[in-house]
Image (tube, rainbow, N blue to C red):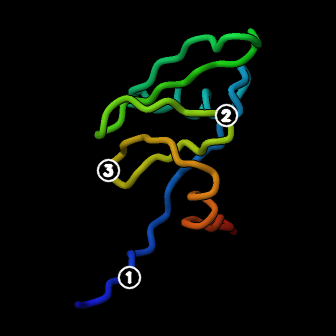
Amino acid sequence: MKKYRKKPIVIEASKWSGRTDDPALQWLSTHKDAPHHMGWSPGDGNLFELVINTPEGAMTVEIGDWIIKGIEGEFYPCKPDIFQKTYDEVKEN
């Protein structure tokens, strides 16, 4: 059995708050090819349910999830604990 290390890559990501003024919505709107749709969540009228069509099918983005743009330009949600274990912030000069 051989061992392999995951290649380091830099991704774009935005944390989803579910609010109508969420920066993730502005970010997604700048990517015309980002396949997503939204609907109102039950209860609080200021919260959105966001669904992203991924290569694996439609996935609901829950509040606190990260929305990631992958290396092939695809978008998908990532749970906060997995995001924290997998990614470090890139500090740009």
Please tell me in which quadrant of the rendered image residue 90 appears.
bottom right
Is 75 placed above or below 32 here?
Answer: below
Which residue is labeled 2 in the image? 63
In the visual, does 93 lie left or right of 37? right
- Near-viewer residue (93 or 52): 52
Quadrant of the snapshot with the N terminus: bottom left
Specify which label sits upstream in the sequence, 2 or 1: 1
The residue tagged 1 is 5
Task: Say whether disc 2 or disc 3 marks the residue closer to the N-terminus.
Answer: 2
Q: Nearer the viewer, mark 2 or mark 3?
A: 2
**Under tag 3, what secondary structure?**
loop
Estimate the spatial distance between the alpha carbons at disc 2 and disc 3, rounded to whole Å: 25 Å
> Which secondary structure, mark 1?
loop
* Amino acid type, residue under disc 3 in the picture: Glu
Question: Image check: 33 left or right of 27?
Answer: left
Q: Amino acid at mark 2?
A: Ile
Q: Could you give the CA–CA distance between mark 2 and mark 1, rounded to whole angstroms?
A: 31 Å
- Residue 72: image tag: 3
The three-letter amino acid code for the residue at tag 1 is Arg
Q: Position of residue 68 (x, y in %)?
A: 50, 47
Please provide percent x and percent y for residue 80.
Answer: 63, 51
